[in-house]
Amino acid sequence: MQLKAATIHLENMRFNARHGVLPQEHAIGGAFTVNAALQLDLEGAERAGTTDDLKATVNYAEVYAALREEMQQPAKLLEHACWRMLQRLLHDFPCVTTATITLRKDTPPMGADCDGCSVTLTACR
């Protein structure tokens, strides 16, 4: 068998954070949802699949903790917060070759009836 791709998804992580341009967004904060897709080094992913050893792959709890820390740092722009999360993931997890982050502001203060506004960024080594 030949492994073609290995992607780990962390879906619908919910955070209260202080991202936004308006002063009240920094003072009060708001609800945000983060989705992450992490493409893994195929050699490590295959090793994890054949050995059942966590050391060969990414620990989801550690990824969540890193994203939670980055979400607690206020940013004016969603793009900036996404950028920081991508930098952190690629720095902290060597077996991640490509990472995609979608950051959604669940209730944007723009007077619109919508489910939120989001930004998606993808970075690779």
Image: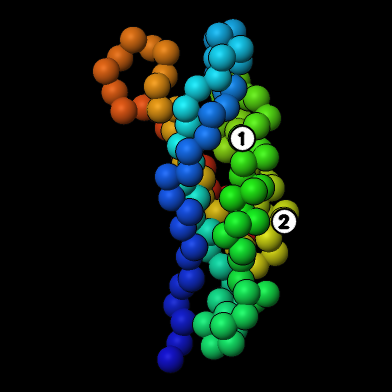
Dot 2: element: helix
Residue at the spot x=65%, y=25% of the render?
74
Residue 31 seen: yes
Residue 110 position (above or below residue 48): above
Residue 30 position (above or below residue 104): above
Which x, y percent locates residue 45?
Answer: 56, 76
View extreme (bottom): residue: 1
Which x, y percent locates residue 78?
Answer: 54, 29
Residue 4 as seen in the image, left or right of residue 18: left
View extreme (right): residue: 91
The image's colour scheme reads rainbow
Which x, y percent locates residue 83?
Answer: 62, 39
Residue placed under numbered mark 1 in the picture: 71
Residue 115 as seen in the image, left or right of residue 80: left
Residue 58 position (above or below residue 110): below
Q: Dot 2, how many residues are within 10 Å of its Cα: few (below 14), some (14-19), or many (20+)?
A: few
Residue 84 seen: no
Foreground of the two, 43 or 11: 11
Query: Mark 2 and mark 1: span between their CA atoms?
Result: 16 Å
Number of numbered markers: 2
Dot 1: element: helix
Which x, y percent locates residue 125?
Answer: 65, 58
Q: Which amino acid does label 2 sit on?
A: Asp
**Mark drawn on residue 57:** none
N-terminal label among 2 and 1? 1
Q: Which amino acid does label 1 sit on?
A: Met
Residue 54 as seen in the image, left or right of residue 5: right
Residue at the spot x=42%, y=13% of the render?
109
Q: Dot 1, how many residues are within 10 Å of its Cα: few (below 14), some (14-19), or many (20+)?
A: many
Residue 81 as seen in the image, left or right of residue 121: right
Residue placed under numbered mark 2 in the picture: 92
